[in-house]
Image (cartoon, helix red, strand yellow):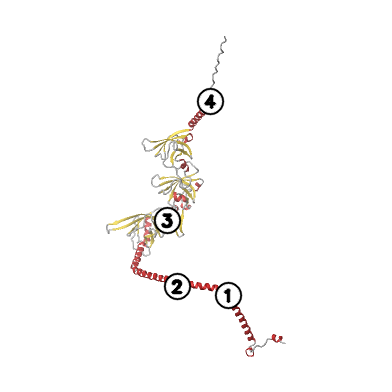
Amino acid sequence: MNQPAPLIVEKARWKPQLVWVVPIVAALVGASLVVQSWRSRGPRIVITFQSADGLQVGKTLVKYRSIAIGRVAALALDADAKAVEVTVDLDRSGAGAATEGTRFWVQHPRLGLEGNAQLDSLLSGSFIGVDPGNTHKAQHEFVGLEEPPALSHGPAGRLVTLHADNLGSIAPGAPVYFRQVRVGRVISTGLSEDRGGVRINAFIDAPNDGLLSPRSRFWNASGIDLSLNADGLKVKTQSLSTILAGGIAFEDAPPETVEGGSVPAPDFTLYQDRTSAFAPAPGEARLVKMRFRHALRGLRVGAPVEMVGVDIGRVTAIDLEFSPKDESFTIVVSAALYPQLMGPAYETLAAAGTANSDDRMAALVGRLVNRGLRVQPRLGSLITGQLYLAMDFLPSPNRAVFDASKRPLELPTAESTTGELQVRVASIAEKLDRLPLSSIAGHLDGDLVTLQSALTHLDRDVLPPAGETVAEARSTLSALRSSLANDSPFRERIDRTLEDTDATLAEIRALAGYLERHPDALLKGRRPDSNEAKKRP
């Protein structure tokens, strides 16, 4: 009996399916991303700011030279809940920012008048700026700045610091001009260390930083400079941006007005305007006082003090004193005088030793007072009513007692010319008040009524007949024009009459010529001509 052949079962082999390719590739890509992220990850740092305005987790970038080197990973309040701790994950390329001395700040979007100022922050939002330190010592906790600092990196150039009493309209990003050409910009602003003024950091781009010298004078070029003088009204400005957003300008002063070496100092003074920037050094101030017994409305602190028309000082204080003896008030004006502003006159006094000695200067002032030197308030502008103090020699001054031993010196004064002007104006007003203006107005009103009646009569009774007469004259002229036309019968008759008259005149001329040749023809009659006799048989 035959046995059945054994059943042979083949084992199935595993074959890769196409559907597994996608998960495998995804796993490989994910692993590569994890490895790449681990390899590119840098240190983690914590920056403390006063607020987290404009910062977002996972979106706000950390930038150095406009290149992203990190990202904000977390935001949290500090232990005292008075500040914000910003956790930042730096890239491996930004590991150099986690060093001692590095400065961080939040750069908010800002569009300046120069066009593209911080345009990247407008597109991407706020970001954290970085200014790396100069050391290699690692540090992971920082205190951020509330304002962008003056960068230690950037294009070639020179960083200068300007000092001024107030900031005005100057802001970071404001332009810096040299002869109306933009050569730099303002980096940052802030209070000075002693809180007595402001500090402005400006960066002058290369190669224009070579324009800086010890003779450089900086001034605030914001707004519009209006000046009215003998040449008329002048308007000066650096550019449209300085009118709206402020700006700074600088130039070189004359060599004779500057002392110092050839290397420009890093600090400069920012003057209020170009005039004060190039004004000569005033030198040492001499304090003086003046007493006035009449009102000085219009005199302000800072008003100029002139010596024979030359500005040599400024009013520093205006006080009011009371005398119990005669129960009167006196206005005491203090002023600072700068004798060096007198120019060659001061040089002459200095050569004689008078300018360097208070006693000699007081003696000189006493002699000038005896010659009529007085301080007199005068009107500087009819429009504003502002006063200034004029030290001048009056032709008939009031009697004054000068004490040369007083310190500060007390200069004698004279009444203001504005009082005389007011008296004259009051006198003119009184004379005008005496005029019979009401009677004149009544007569004028009656004359106007009579004139109106005459004009009404002229319009009603005279003008219509005159219009008819003009129309008739116009009709007559039209008829005369048609009668004198070239093809009119009247014109032909006139022409024939003129021709007949011309012929008659010719005959008369011939008769007159014959009588002139033969005067006896009036008695004997006309004799025949020789030509006619020859023709007869």
CB under 8 Å between callouts 2 and 1? no
CB under 8 Å between callouts 4 and 3? no
| Residue wearing tag 1 | 489
CB under 8 Å between callouts 2 and 3? no
Amino acid, disc 3: Leu
Q: Earlier in the sequence, mark 2 or mark 3?
A: 3
Residue 221 visible in rendering:
no
Q: Earlier in the sequence, mark 4 or mark 2?
A: 4
Residue drawn at (51%, 73%), measured in percent from left and top?
Answer: 476
Q: Earlier in the sequence, mark 1 or mark 4?
A: 4
- Given residues 152 and 518, the one toward you in this image is 518
Callout 2: few (<14), some (14-19), or many (20+) C-alpha neighbours within 10 Å? few
Amino acid, disc 1: Pro
Callout 1: few (<14), some (14-19), or many (20+) C-alpha neighbours within 10 Å? few
CB under 8 Å between callouts 4 and 2? no
Counting from the top left corner in percent of width and height, residue 92 is at 48, 34
Q: Earlier in the sequence, mark 4 or mark 3?
A: 4
Secondary element at tag 3: helix
Secondary element at tag 2: helix
Quarter of the picture containing the N terminus is top right
Q: Nearer the viewer, mark 4 or mark 2?
A: 2
| Residue wearing tag 4 | 17
| Residue wearing tag 2 | 465
State which quadrant residue 401 falls in: bottom left
Counting from the top left corner in percent of width and height, residue 500 is at 60, 80
Q: Earlier in the sequence, mark 1 or mark 3?
A: 3
Compute the Cα span from label 1 to label 4.
Answer: 129 Å
257 relative to 423 in the view: left or right: right
